[in-house]
Image (cartoon, grey):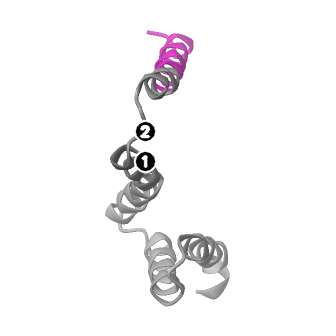
Amino acid sequence: MSYITAVAVLTLVALGTRLSGAVLMAWVTPTPRVEKFLQGMSVSVIAALVASSLVSLDLKAFAATCGAILVAALSRSVIWAMLAGMIVAALYPQVI
């Protein structure tokens, strides 16, 4: 299988999943339970990405995660926590 074929298949799968979600939501009535699920999905995707980076035992990712957790605990804001994590990750090589 060539790289072009693999990229084309992955592109079609990604497009299919995105379109099927939009088509499915056109048929599903948004109950409070469905709305709560959709609101929590973005945070769960970010948490999964952070968890997968922590498994690699990267000190930069660990420092950024600790900074984000600290800011999240103090501010109770996901946006400020993500911003703090990005700042710690961006400054990490210069700090240590």
Q: Quick check: marks 1 and 2 in contact, CB under 8 Å?
A: yes
Residue 12: within the magenta? yes
Residue at x 40%, y 60% (from the top left corner): 47
Q: Which residue is mark 1?
A: 35
Q: How many residues crowd around disc 2 within 10 Å: few (fewer than 14), some, or many (20 or more)? A: few
Quick check: 94 above or below 82? Answer: below
Residue at x 44%, y 75% (from the top left corner): 59
Q: Secondary structure at mark 2?
A: loop
Please state which amino acid type lies under the numbered disc 2: Pro
Tell me where residue 67 appears, x and y as whole percent. Answer: 51, 82
Tell me where residue 57 appears, x and y as whole percent. Answer: 36, 68
Horizontally, residue 31 falls left or right of residue 13, namely: left
Please state which amino acid type lies under the numbered disc 1: Glu
Q: Secondary structure at mark 1?
A: helix
> Which portion, as a residue range, is magenta?
1-18
Q: Which residue is mark 2?
A: 30
